Image: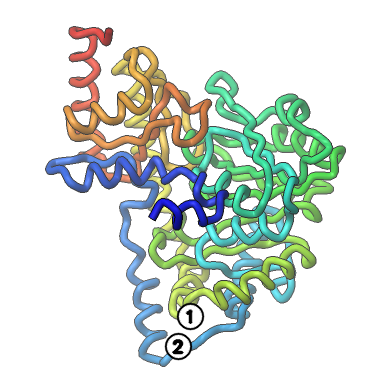
Amino acid sequence: MNTLYERLSPVVRNLPPSGIRRFFDLASQMQDVISLGVGEPDFVTPWHVREACMYSLEQGYTTYTPNRGLPELCVEIAKYLTKFGLTYDPSHEVLVTVGGSEAIDLALRALVCPGDEVLIPVPTYVSYKPCALLAGADVVELPTYAEDGFRLTADALERAITPRSKVLVLCFPNNPTGAVMDKEDLQAIAEVVQRHDLFVVSDEIYAELTYGSQHVSIAAIPGMRERTVVVSGMSKAYAMTGWRIGYAAGPEPIISAMLKIHQYTIMCAPHMAQRAALEALRNGDDERDRMVESYDRRRKLIVAGLNEIGLPCHEPRGAFYAFPDIRPTGLTSEQFAERLLLEQGVAVVPGNVFGDPGEGFVRCSYATSVELIEEALRRIRTFVEHLSYHPVR
């Protein structure tokens, strides 16, 4: 077996298993666990969306669709993106994918050559680095910090660029920090990107989940549309994680290259899930807005609670994650997460799995009920107070 393992791709051999999944697996074997770790809405997909899927099955929509996706769905996606000041031709500049994750993978494989550098601000979503490595790129991580609101600065980007730099991956609103980039932040980043002739893959899956401000896409900054692939999907805003419907929008040459890979590897996204997504985009705004209002209430509750406990937490302005600083406890991120789970039955994700700058923090998802958040905060307080009576040595 060792010989067989050694014959596998060295890139795949060296990929670490997901640090998030380890804690989910551990929590699933325990009783009375409150999970603040799952990165998905706790809402069920709205009934009218599920009904549209069932109706599609009754009508026999069980076939392949065009590789690009249902034409009418591409039209609705292009129409939806106009709310962010983005204009795309649905016939040539939009691609429906199996979740936003496939769109990220396709974009990187279409854009990079072996040896190119992909620049990734961290802490961030765990899939970007593996996807870049699998595409043959070298990854350059750009640390972001709590004192900057975990935003990427133009100076940090400028310092990291080399002649091999090719693609910048952005994830704002950010998973795991909840950070948001304002228009002025993005304009400064755009100037650096254009000066060094970079491409951008902008994961905007949390665009609808912003609080107190309107989401701004870097593709809407002058000069950026032609060098940006916008990635999003139905999972977060419409509570459709399991449906696996994402999309990419961008310049026709890049989307066509992504479509070519998609044709050979996936064929098309599931037909009935595309029908459900069509219904969500056409008639799902009211339910989406109610979910966002609920997340906002929970956001305020968990941030205030963590700060009161003595775990400093910057204000997350997007997504549905809080990212408290657990360094006052004297524990590492993994020690804190593991002991909190085993001793108090609360599951959080250690911040270091999102990149080295996440060490000293944990990710807490507030995509769960107010009652469970309140109980989780009580248990976290008990855990931290116990540590204060029994200091870590």
Instruction: Give the tally of numbered discs.
Output: 2
Residue 196, above or below 76: above
**Residue indicated by mark 2:** 61
The x, y position of residue 222, in whole percent, is 82, 47
Nearer the N terminus, badge 2 or badge 1?
Answer: 2
Q: Residues within 10 Å of mark 1 (few under 14, many from 20)?
A: many
Q: Residues within 10 Å of mark 2 (few under 14, many from 20)?
A: some
Q: Residue furthest right?
A: 195
Q: Which quarter of the rendering shows the C terminus?
A: top left
Query: Quick one: 260 or 227, which is closer to the camera?
Result: 260
Q: Which residue is depicted at the point 73% across and 51% down?
A: 114
Q: Residue furthest left?
A: 31
Q: Which quarter of the rendering shows the N terminus?
A: bottom left
* The image quarter in which residue 236 lies: bottom left
The x, y position of residue 384, in whole percent, is 24, 17
The x, y position of residue 90, in whole percent, is 69, 72
**Residue indicated by mark 1:** 271
Q: Is residue 305 visible to the viewer in this orientation of the structure?
A: no
Residue 253, above or below 187: below
Residue 307, above or below 21: above
Query: Quick one: 174 or 299, which is closer to the camera?
Result: 174
Looking at the image, do the residues carrying marks 2 and 1 touch, with CB atoms under 8 Å apart? yes
Q: Which residue is depicted at the point 78% across and 29% down?
A: 158
Residue at mark 2 to residue at mark 1: CA–CA distance = 6 Å
Q: Which residue is depicted at the point 29% across and 18% down?
A: 309
